[in-house]
Amino acid sequence: MSHCNHGQDDHSHLIPCSEVLSKVYAFIDGQLDVRELEGFQEHIRLCLPCQELVKFEEKLVEMIKKKGCHQKNEIPSTLMDKIKQAIDVSSKP
Amino acid sequence: MTPKEFEGQALQHTESLYNTAMRLTRNPSDAEDLVQEVFYKAFRSLSQFEPGTNMRAWLFKILINTHISQYRKSSKDPTVGGYDDVEEFSLYNQVHNRASSLSDTPAGILDKFLEEDIRNAIDKLPEQFRDVVMLVDIEGFSYKEASDILNTPVGTVMSRLFRSRKLLQKYLWEYAVEYGLVK
Ligand SMILES: [Zn+2]
């Protein structure tokens, strides 16, 4: 029983694969509500192709977060001066 | 909140504001001016800030809005609607379908990309998409916070994020082909 049969037969209560596809990022980002989450998790537990896809997308997002971060730019000292200047000017009535 | 208290808290966000500004402007001097403007506006509108709410989100909102009004006036950003076809792109399927001729699994190929590749791919995104990725994935804002910062519904944040990640997969696939990771 490695495939969901696209919502037919004994898995008719499952959400369709297309819904997994459209909700995959909301799932990864923790944005599904309890009910949606339940349906989503049950689907990927029973449907191997979707399970594989979700694992892949999870890894992709994790990689974007880890490797996509900003290049570490040293804060120029001139910037601190400019900020001080901005604060001074804007504090004046 | 006194200006001094506000200053103390706001200054803690200088680094992430500057790094984001660098990414938005791609130019150190423009980035400095942008961050200066953010602090200027923040202090000017200090009375509008509600103590106890998220100052970081508030400062980022000023940053994004200032950047949009200053730097995007002249350049026409491609409309989001132009990227409809991208939704279908799946790196997973691309690799999966060639699995027999590849030594890699779809997940395995992700390990081959360098930080530089990911950064370049993000920087290549159309601005509206890049903004969402930077806010949610890089700066760690929630969908709700990002929607507030960008002045756009949560649903729009979600759909832009969806398309951004599909588009990133497309760029990564192009890199993989270019590097000969796939044939
Ligand atoms: Zn499925």
Image (cartoon, rainbow, N blue to C red):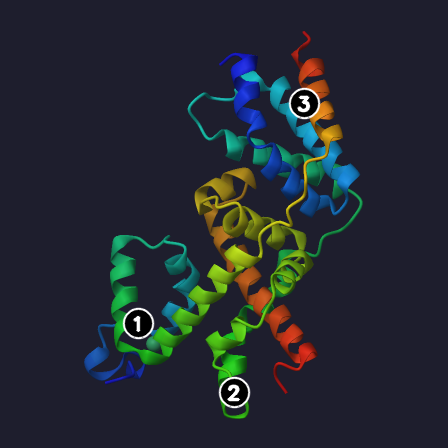
- The chain letter under disc 2 is B
Question: Is B148 situated left or right of B69 in this image?
Answer: left
| Mark 3 vs mark 1, CA separation in Å | 50 Å
Q: Secondary structure at mark 3?
A: helix
Q: Position of residue B112 (x, y in %)?
A: 57, 73
Three-letter residue code for mark 2: Ser
- Residue at point 54%, 21% (across, down): B8
Which marked residue is nearer to the observer: mark 2 or mark 1? Answer: 2
Location of mark 2 (residue) = B103
Location of mark 3 (residue) = B40
- The chain letter under disc 3 is B
- Residue at point 47%, 21% (across, down): B50
Three-letter residue code for mark 3: Tyr
Location of mark 1 (residue) = A44
Q: Is mark 1 within 8 Å of ligand 1?
A: yes
Ligand 1: quadrant of the figure: bottom left
Which is more N-terminal, label 2 or label 3?
Answer: 3
Q: Are marks 3 and 1 on the same chain?
A: no
Q: Are marks 2 and 1 in contact (CB under 8 Å)?
A: no
